[in-house]
Image: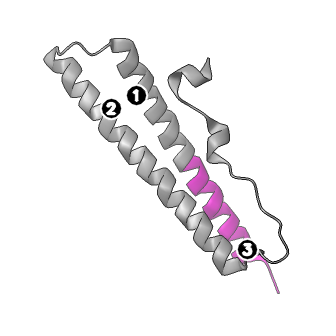
Amino acid sequence: MIEKIGIQPASLLKPIQTDAKASAGAADLGKSFGDMLNQAIGQLSAQEKNVEILNDQFVRGEGVDAHQLTINAERLSLGLELTVQVRNKVIEAYQDIMRTQI
């Protein structure tokens, strides 16, 4: 059922490659993590624009299905909530690292 509304969480996760010659340093991992976050924010922005368009069409009475509008709005809400939680965890991890004594 979750595939019908277009949410596929497994597609967001990429397997970690463990080749000896393809091992990445901390800078490379940080860059790839940053790229993944930028891609997720871009997708969230696209979802927001889609919901705004559907909402405007619904208000004008252009035949937008109310169920589809509700599903897209809830998907956007869940995406925003996930983004906030990831941000909170990243900040918490950073604070834990900064509190670590050497």
Q: Is residue 7 left or right of residue 102?
A: left
Q: Position of residue 54 (x, y in %)?
A: 27, 26
Question: Disc 2 or disc 3, which is closer to the eye?
Answer: 2
Distance, label 1 to label 2, CA atoms, is 6 Å
Label placed on residue 88: none
Residue topped by disc 2? 51
Q: Secondary structure at mark 3?
A: helix
Q: Residue at x 53, y 64 (%)?
A: 35
* Disc 3 crowd, CA 10 A, few/some/many (<14, 14-19, 20+): few
The region drawn magenta spans 84-102
Q: Is residue 2 above or below residue 10?
A: above
Amino acid type of the residue tagged 2 in the rendering:
Val
Amino acid type of the residue tagged 1 in the rendering:
Ala
Q: Residue at x 35, y 39 (%)?
A: 48
Which comes sooner in the sequence, label 2 or label 3? 2
Residue topped by disc 1? 73
Q: Is residue 87 left or right of residue 17?
A: left
| Quarter of the view holding residue 24 | bottom right
* Disc 1 crowd, CA 10 A, few/some/many (<14, 14-19, 20+): some
